[in-house]
Each structure stands twice: as structure tokens, then as C-alpha cells.
Image (spheres, rainbow, N blue to C red):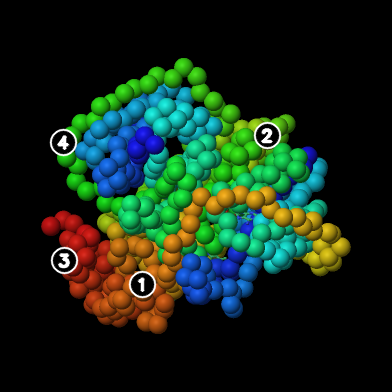
């Protein structure tokens, strides 16, 4: 079975964000980019599924030359091959999904793993969009996954619990933290990754249906009050919550 | 262009969720500004409080009903709602950014071949154009976006848009009994988590961090949550340590919350934690380190020992509640 995993290449979550000179995107200077944290769960689940059922795993990433770093990381973890869908320009989620769907078709993949969310734009939709474009079944925000005899049983996180969902291949799964413990790349894996080739091709052109008007930093909250440094401050806190904030 | 806004109403256990009332009010306000008509659609089995939606500005609700639809199914809900969108030729479809809304909305945007904006926290009309503001990069940036395609899908962050007080208006309710549904993905069971209230839906959250020193001390967090009628939350450090379940984690790799009141106890306020809770209306921090970053976002802080402060706070609040 051919399994695909889609990864995005994003600023490290500890990054300080500065707005770029265009006023519409972040200034990449001094920003460290990493594999999107949720995509590590996706990679791990793809590898586990291959280990259980056999087959081949391909990693796909859309973006600039630097995305190869994240592709290499997936290869070092044990993914078989990589594809970079090259596009240096900004794409919205749907335009990303259209190019990914096209490549998943080319690869004849029947099972595709995504992260539940890319921690740059925080949309949480590319997996579902791609599934719908492909006509695949889809389960998002998955914390447990099993594929046996073409039947998928997955648990997805919802408010106050989990939905246990049944579906079948072909399918898209988006990974939530808790699904597994991503493996570390071994030294051997890192060496092997250097010999694996990354196929590079232009991403399928697609029109953006959204446009950024302006990006700003949130106005910093005005520093609050430290009311006191022991339990003696409790009555004042309660009074403020009641009379000023009116929340209790 | 039929000039119609459609709002999707989410039900669980046969009741419309509060987030749906917010979405209804948002949609009807937006319709007012654009001089559009507004309609609502719901999917499920029996829904007991559909008439309430009239009070939030919706004149007509179509309920797509089938006994197999009480629980969510991506395939069935996508098919039913997209058929309905096509039938009434809706231009804009609004969802709440709940677990269900996040799953369903993107499927429909593909069906409509429309642009989609997720998790809006603000909406403005500029020169007749809808502009939506949404947090990105773990709330470190606020981006204003517009949708350039004729059809539009929007999800709004729960707890941000005030539904206001309902009026007495009753909607016209059309119940549409379905004969077949596409259950190629279907929910076979719902496993409820032990906690009573989920952080994603709570008005008040009390969260504990590594400063609580061990899982046994979370009893204090739970007691405080109890008196406040709050949900309990956690930092990642305590989830990773196995003290608390992941479903409680607030932050960049946990849940994003916007409660009216967020109480952070023994939480340092790392940037990834702030990403999930900084849009809370009021933030209270209890931390023995007065330089902890959490105090930079807190409205009210006590720079003291949680083990000393919490018992007193719990007692004081009990008194207030009894009054
Ligand atoms: C990719 C990535 C994603 C992440 N995602 C998240 C996320 O989603 N959510 C999240 O929370 N974190 C996340 N983190 C982790 C984050 O960086 C912090 O490590 C974490 O939030 C720290 O948790 P904490 O505040 O409980 O612990 P600490 O940072 O150890 O803070 C404990 C605090 O308790 C105080 N304290 C100690 N004793 C007492 C006492 N007796 N009374 C009162 N106060 C006391 C201390 O002064 C200290 O400020 C992420 C990190 C990475 C790298
Ligand atoms: N440029 C991209 N290339 C490959 N995969 C992507 C890209 N952007 C997003 N994804 C995938 O889609 C998931 C959800 O992204 P998002 O909808 O942007 O939050 C990510 O976790 C990735 O698995």
C-alpha cells in the first residue's frame, strides 16, 4: 500500500514574531524553521502503519527550497521518498490542498496522514480540504488509529470526550498529539536520508481565494496588578473579580 | 447571487450548543449589515430547543432529520449541508469553530469551491467587503483577511462573539425527514472524558501547572473549579508528566480557549501556553515567582505560594457564592 504524509515547514513555536516590511507576513529573519510539531505524529503513524501492513511511505511538502529540511527529517525517521512541490509564493489553504491532492493522485496513495494543524497559520483544514478534493474519507484530530482489513477505526478528540469513528480506505487522517510518540531519527537513519532523493517539481498552479489585508501584532495587554504576595490578598482579589471584572 | 447567509447550527445530544447561538447572532448581524437574508440549517435526530434560535435573529431553520444522524458523520453531514447550500444558493456559510465546525466547514468550502477563513475573532465591513481578523502563529500575530471568491465560508471562535439576550421571536421551523444518509464515515461510540466540563466550552477555567508539585495536589485546582463552576485545565508540563489528561492541555499544542475568566496557578506563562489562553477576557495568576511571564498578561495576580493562597481563595469564594 502506498501511504503519503504531508508536512509543513514552520517557525519554531518559541519564535518571536515580527511583522515583515510588506505588513502582511512575518519577517523570516532570525526565525528557526522546524517540521510542524503535529506532522511528526503523522510521520510516526505512517511509519507504524507501513511496519504493520507493508508498503511504502512518501512525504510531500509544498513550499520553498527550505522545506527540504523538513522532508529530510521525515526521511531520516524512515520515510522512503520525498517530494517537494515547489512554490515560493504565499498560498492559502485551499490552494495548498489542490496541489497536494494532485500529487497524492500521482502517487496513487490510498492513505494520507496530515497534522491536525500547522502552527504557522493555525487553520486546521488542509487535511480535510485535501480529502474532499480527492473524494477520500476523512477523520480529523485523531488520537488513536487502527487499520485492519481495509477497515479504519479512529478516535477523534471532541469537546468533553472522543468520537470513535469507523470508515474505510481511501482515507485522510489528521494527527493530534497523543496519537503516538514520534521516534527520533537514528544516526543510521540520518545517513540513509542523505542518499535518498527528493523529487522536486513545480506545485500545481491554483488561485488563492483569500487575501491578507494586514498583519499586526496583538496590542500587548496592559500590565496587570499584582495585588499581594500571600493569602492576605485573597479578599481584594475576590472583590475585584466581583466588582471590577464582574465575572463571579 | 441569492444574497443569503446560511448558519450551521450544531447540536449535541439533541440540544443546540451555545456556540450555535453565537454563530446565529453573528450571521444575522452580518446579514443585517450586508442587507442579505439569513437562514439556518441543523442536522441530527430530535432537537429540543430549535425554537430558541429565533431569539437570536434567525427567521427560518431547516432541520435535516434522521435517526442515524444524532452523532456526527463527516460524510453524511457534508452531503446534506452541501445539498442544502446548493438548494438555497447560499453565498456565505457560517460555522462555530468547534471540533465539529472545524471538521465540517473545510469539506463544504471544497463543495462550494470557495475561500474559507477559520477561527475569526472580529468581523468588519470595509467598503462593502467583509474583513475578518484571526489569530495566527500561536496568537503572536493578528491577521486581517478577506475572501475573494464569490462564495464564502467562515468559522468564528467560540465565546468571542456575544449572542446577547434573546428576544421572543420564534423562527419558522421546517423539519426535513431524510430517507437515506451517506455513512461512509460514522461515529460508532462517544467516549466521555472524566472531567465534567471541557476547557474549550467553559466560561471559567482554572488551570494548574508544574507549580502544583504533583498530581495529588490537583484536588485544590478541582475544588477551586468547583466553586467557580469552572473547567479544569493544565499546562503541557503537567500533561507530559502524566499528572493530567491531554484533553485538559491549554496552549499551542493543546486547546485554544477564550473564557471570561482564566485562573492560572503555578504556571510560568511560557509563550506556547499563552498562545492558547491570552485572549481570555480576564486572567488571574497565582505564582510564587513575581517575575513569572504569566503576570505580564494577568489582570490580577497574587505573587504567592499556591498552597497557601488556594485554600483561602476557595473559602472566600464559597462565602461569596452563599451570599
Ligand atoms: C513545540 C512546543 C509546544 C508546546 N505547547 C505547549 C502547550 O500547548 N501548552 C503549554 O502549557 N506548554 C506548551 N509547551 C511547553 C512550554 O514551553 C512550557 O514548558 C510549559 O508551559 C511549562 O509548564 P508550567 O508553566 O506548568 O511549568 P514551569 O515552566 O516549570 O512553571 C512552573 C511555575 O510554577 C511556579 N511555582 C512553583 N511552585 C509554586 C508554588 N508553590 N506556588 C505557586 N507557584 C509555584 C514557578 O514559579 C513557575 O513559574 C510547548 C513547548 C514546545 C517546545
Ligand atoms: N505547505 C504544506 N505542504 C505540505 N503539507 C502541508 C502544508 N501546509 C499544511 N500542510 C499539512 O496540513 C496540515 C494542516 O495544516 P493547516 O490547515 O494549515 O493548519 C499540516 O499539519 C500538514 O500536514
**Mark identifier at residue A169:** 2
- Residue at (86, 63) in percent of width and height: A195
In the image, is residue B289 above or below residue A130?
A: below
On the image, numbered disc 1 is attached to which residue?
A219
Q: Quadrant of residue B322?
A: bottom left
Q: Chain of mark 2?
A: A
For residue A184, say whether it is visible. Answer: no
Give how far across and how far down residue B205 sits, in percent: 35, 58
Q: Residue furthest left?
A: B323
Q: Nearer the viewer, residue B2 or B297?
A: B2
Task: For mark 3, name the chain.
Answer: A
Q: Are marks 2 and 4 on the same chain?
A: no
Please name which of the two marks, 1 or 2, marks the residue nearer to the observer: 1
Mark 2 Cβ and ligand 2 under 8 Å apart? no
Q: What residue is disc 4 on? A: B168
Are the residues at dot 2 and dot 3 in contact (C-beta closer than 8 Å)?
no
Identify residue for label 3: A243
Amino acid at each position: 500500500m502506498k501511504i503519503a504524509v504531508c508536512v509543513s515547514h514552520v517557525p519554531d513555536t518559541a519564535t518571536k514574531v515580527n511583522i515583515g516590511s510588506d505588513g502582511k507576513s512575518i519577517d523570516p529573519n532570525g526565525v528557526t524553521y522546524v517540521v510542524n510539531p503535529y506532522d511528526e505524529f503523522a510521520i510516526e503513524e505512517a511509519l507504524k502503519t507501513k511496519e504493520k501492513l507493508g508498503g511504502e511511505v512518501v512525504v510531500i511538502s509544498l513550499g520553498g527550497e527550505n522545506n527540504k529540511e523538513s522532508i529530510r527529517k521525515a526521511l531520516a525517521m524512515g520515510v522512503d521518498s520525498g517530494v517537494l512541490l515547489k512554490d515560493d509564493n504565499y498560498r492559502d489553504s485551499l490552494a495548498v490542498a489542490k496541489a497536494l491532492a494532485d500529487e497524492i493522485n500521482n502517487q496513487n496513495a490510498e492513505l494520507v496522514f496530515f497534522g491536525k494543524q500547522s502552527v504557522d497559520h493555525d487553520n486546521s483544514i488542509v487535511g480535510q480540504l485535501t480529502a474532499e478534493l480527492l473524494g477520500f474519507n476523512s477523520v480529523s484530530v485523531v488520537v488513536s488509529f487502527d487499520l485492519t482489513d481495509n477497515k479504519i477505526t479512529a478516535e477523534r478528540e471532541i469537546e468533553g470526550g472522543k468520537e470513535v469513528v469507523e470508515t474505510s480506505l481511501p482515507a485522510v487522517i489528521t494527527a493530534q498529539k497523543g496519537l503516538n510518540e514520534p521516534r527520533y531519527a537514528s544516526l543510521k537513519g540520518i545517513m540513509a536520508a542523505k542518499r535518498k532523493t527528493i523529487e522536486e517539481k513545480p506545485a500545481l498552479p491554483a488561485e488563492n481565494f483569500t487575501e491578507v489585508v494586514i498583519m499586526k501584532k496583538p496590542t500587548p495587554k496592559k500590565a496587570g496588578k499584582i495585588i499581594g504576595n500571600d493569602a492576605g490578598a485573597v479578599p481584594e482579589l475576590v472583590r475585584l473579580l466581583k466588582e471590577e471584572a464582574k465575572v463571579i | 447571487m441569492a444574497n443569503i447567509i446560511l448558519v450551521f447550527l450544531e447540536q449535541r445530544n439533541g440540544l443546540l450548543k451555545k456556540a450555535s447561538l453565537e454563530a446565529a447572532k453573528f450571521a444575522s448581524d452580518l446579514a443585517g449589515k450586508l442587507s442579505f437574508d439569513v437562514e439556518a440549517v441543523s442536522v441530527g435526530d430530535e432537537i429540543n430547543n430549535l425554537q430558541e434560535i429565533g431569539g437570536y435573529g434567525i427567521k427560518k431553520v431547516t432541520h435535516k432529520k434522521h435517526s442515524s444522524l444524532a452523532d456526527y458523520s463527516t460524510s453524511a453531514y457534508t452531503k446534506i449541508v452541501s445539498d442544502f447550500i446548493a438548494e438555497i444558493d447560499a453565498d456565505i456559510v457560517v460555522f462555530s469553530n468547534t471540533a465539529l465546525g472545524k471538521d465540517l466547514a473545510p469539506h463544504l468550502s471544497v463543495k462550494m469551491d470557495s475561500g474559507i477563513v477559520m477561527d475569526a475573532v472580529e468581523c468588519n465591513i470595509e467598503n462593502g467587503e467583509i474583513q475578518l481578523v484571526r489569530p495566527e502563529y500561536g496568537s503572536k500575530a493578528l491577521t486581517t483577511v478577506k475572501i475573494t471568491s464569490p462564495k464564502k465560508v467562515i468559522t468564528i471562535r467560540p465565546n468571542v462573539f456575544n449572542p446577547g439576550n434573546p428576544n421572543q421571536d420564534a423562527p419558522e421551523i421546517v423539519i426535513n425527514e431524510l430517507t437515506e444518509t451517506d455513512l461512509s464515515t460514522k461515529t460508532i461510540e462517544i467516549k466521555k472524558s472524566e472531567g465534567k466540563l471541557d476547557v474549550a466550552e467553559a466560561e471559567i477555567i482554572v488551570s494548574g501547572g508544574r507549580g502544583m508539585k504533583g498530581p495529588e495536589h490537583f484536588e485544590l485546582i478541582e475544588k477551586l473549579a468547583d466553586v467557580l463552576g469552572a473547567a479544569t485545565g493544565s499546562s503541557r508540563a503537567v500533561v507530559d508528566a502524566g499528572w493530567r489528561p491531554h484533553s485538559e492541555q491549554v496552549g499551542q499544542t493543546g486547546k485554544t480557549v477564550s473564557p471570561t475568566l482564566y485562573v492560572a496557578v503555578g504556571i510560568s506563562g511560557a509563550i506556547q501556553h499563552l498562545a492558547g489562553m491570552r485572549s481570555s477576557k480576564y486572567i488571574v495568576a497565582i505564582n510564587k515567582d513575581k517575575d513569572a511571564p504569566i503576570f505580564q498578561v494577568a489582570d490580577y495576580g497574587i505573587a504567592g505560594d499556591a498552597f497557601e493562597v488556594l485554600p483561602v481563595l476557595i473559602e472566600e469564594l464559597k462565602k461569596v457564592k452563599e451570599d
